[in-house]
Amino acid sequence: MNVSKPPKCQTLIGRLALVCGFLVASLNLIGTSVVAQENPRELFAQGNLQYDSSHYIEAIAAYNQIIFLGQESPELYHNLGNAYFESGDLGHAILNYLRAERLDPYDDDIADNLAFARGFVSLQLEGVELNPAIEFFDGVAGGASLNFWAWLTTGVMFLLVCLLIYRIITRQRTIALQAGTVAIIIVFVALASLTTFKYRHEFAADRAVVTLPDIPVTDRPSRDAAVEFRAAAGLEVVIRERSGDFVLALFANKRQGWVLQNALERL
Amino acid sequence: MTLWATILSMSVVFLAAVGQKALAAGQVSVTLSVDRTSMSMGETATLLVTLKGADRNSPAPALRNLTGFNILNRSSSVNFQSINGVSETSTNLTLTIAPKKIGAYVIGPAEVTIAGKLYKSNQLAVAVTAEQPITEADAGGKKKDLFIEATVDNANPYVGEQTLLIVRFYHAINLLTQPSYTAPQTTDFWSEVIASQPAYYTNVGGRRYRVWEIRTALFPTRSGKLQIGRAFIETQIANKRRETKFGFGSFFNRGKSVSLRTRPLEINVKPLPTANKPQDFSGVVGSYTLTASADQSTTEVNSPVTVTVRISGLGNIKVLPRPKTPTTKDFRIYDGSSEETVSKGKKALGGVKTFEQTFIPTREGRLSIPGVVYDFFDPQEKKYKVIQTPDMPLHVEPSSQALNNSTQFNFGNNVKVGSGMSAIRYIKKNDNDFTKVGEILLFDNLYLAINTLPVLALFGAILYRRRRDKFDSDSGYARSRSAGRLAAKRLKQARSLASVAHAEEFFGEIRLAILAFVADKLNVSPHGLTIGEVTELLATAGFKDDELEKCRRLIQRADYVRYSSGAITEKDIQGSLELANEILIRLQEVNLERL
């Protein structure tokens, strides 16, 4: 579990209260960068050189050092996925392609490599049924990053608020103004829903990837439990529950079972 | 009535018929025998009363001198035998007895009266000694009713070599519960129970025992002197019985729990020899054979070929590591699933383990999948062995996915390139801006602040609208809210007129500033207010007497100057201006609206 968990959402009131207090501090922080012992750019270049020389293990080490320093980028995860793929570690390859895709869903290289790597997963799950509603939202929201949707929602909110202020100050009640207000409210609610879906689906859900080959999936959280099936490296799961060293993993075909925690890595 | 009397009376009825028949058949005899003549407290003996030659309706023999024992169990059987046309009936009465106390006893004789004649059996001498403590098996322990022992078949194995631990539980007496086995602690071993065979009988020291046997394969994980802990058996056996005055003691005897344990065993584990040890030795110990096969001999670029490696033999099959695969640029190699079939013989653990590997050719041509190399140490032959499978030829054709994809682009000259991928896209060289790991915009304080701004602006607009509405609809409120601003404006105007030449206008503005302030706060006309009314209101509002006096004097002077300005000096004007300013400040401190 190399990647730290996203910050928990606090209550709205608490967050708003904090905002005012931290506004000045936040503004002061703009433009400053994290002071690291090593330069991420140099490490990135070093990893690329190692990759060019087919030294994939060394490339992985250099890329991972950047993540250890607390920095990330879609390009970094993409290259790390490539290095893992070339070194034969399919699980970590898919994991890092997914991380890259989450940060930059527009990038065709990332999407193609992820699809290509998925084709090599040695176990294909049967009976994968997709929820039409989720598929629809995913189809719409999946085309852009969370940041894009968040800023777009903010922009529309500004527009909506300006319109409302204008109506309040001027007391105008024309049909065109009312229709425009309703339209913008609908757009705002739709965008806010998409942003929420994007966040819940890609960041809040406890998603993970099987990173070790041939992992027993058992019917209870015990090493002596009956093995229901064996999972392959690269399979994507959602973690439902934890019990000791085990996690309850939900696979794409809705089959679930207990898997040793160290066989998975969170997105 | 004693228990014995009860049994006797029942036996009389049971054997009555037998006796009648025996009379007709010939000589009647009664014999008494016991399976042991020496026993300790807590042990049991089997007493057999045999009545031969009597009719099956004959009475049962009565047994004398058995008061020193509890009868734990009794059973009877009738045998018919025909030899040369002469039939004979024998009735056996079997009693399981347990001593009540230490001592030397004479049991019997057994007596039966058939057709008025008394028949007597022999007598038996039985010695009862003190109870032996039941602990663990030792040389003398084999005389006990129950004991446990643990042995290993190889006390000097190599690291990873199997040593067989056999735990045997012997019991010569009946158990009231199934024995419960607790395996010994084997910290430095990988263990697997390989056989728990059905109980069998054996003779130890001339005594017949029922034996429970548990076999465990142990594989030491390190060299040196290692200890196998104690194994435990727990069960329940019959307790010493106490006769009640009604003779029903045995019915309420629930038995006692017995716990047996083995002695710890120590074995000396040898390290694997260093001579001729292969480089990067995997640590596998046992005796194995190796095969490998590919599921196809012809494929396309980027089409996977599954190679199944099969390792079989004797050893710790479950922990066999995956074979090392030589790296080659011709293939991408991925580890697949593994499966093991463990066979548990009586003496050794073994089986088959299969590993799957996926080879994906990266180029076309006549390639060969490299053979699998596996090394292990054979403890029987005491040497390292390296086994290898031959290379597997593979004919790789160009990828049809890349050439025959539905989305094709024709560049002329019959060259077609599909959109399907034949390899992953190359790494990205541009180092775009890095961000903090796990940073989510939605929870960024700056983002939240930006989103808070329009909400605040909306609230501001609503408040502004409400204020404007109140100003428009409530003139009193509007006058009250603007009283201070207007007073300040008038004072400023007065300051600009502060000269003897404009004394009349100056004092007019001073007077209006004070009176209009009070009138606006009270929403009344300033022109109707008199000095008396103003001072009275101010007194009610909390003005002190000296403050009231100052206010009264200022207004009176202003009235006076309006009609006669000749006696006014520059000093008076400046003093009045300061006084007016002081009074207005004081007026703004009090709440005139509540009056």
Image (spheres, coloured by chain):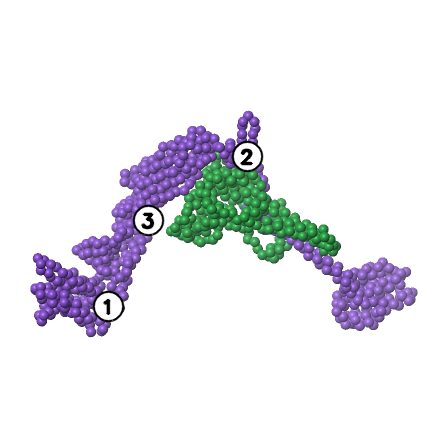
Chain colours: A green, B purple
- The number of numbered discs placed on residues in the rendered structure image is 3
- Relative image position of residue B14 (x, y in whole percent): 17, 67
Q: Amino acid at mark 1?
A: Ser
Residue marked by disc 3: B191
Residue shown at the point (35%, 42%) measured from the top left: B353
Q: Amino acid at mark 3?
A: Ser
Q: Is residue B3 visible?
A: yes
Name the foreground residue: A241 vs A74.
A241
Marks 3 & 1, CB-CB < 8 Å contact: no
Residue furthest to the front in view is B85
- Relative image position of residue A182 (x, y in whole percent): 67, 52
Residue marked by disc 1: B250
- Relative image position of residue B501 (x, y in whole percent): 90, 60
The answer to whether residue B72 is left or right of residue B343 is left
For the N terminus of chain B, which image quadrant? bottom left
For the C terminus of chain B, which image quadrant? bottom right
The answer to whether residue B581 is left or right of residue B202 is right
Q: Nearer the viewer, mark 3 or mark 2?
A: 2
Name the foreground residue: B466 vs B148.
B466
Q: Is residue B110 visible?
A: no
Q: How many neighbours does mark 3 have within 10 angstroms: few (below 14), some (14-19), or many (20 or more)?
A: some
Residue shown at the point (75%, 69%) measured from the top left: B594
Name the secondary structure under disc 3.
strand
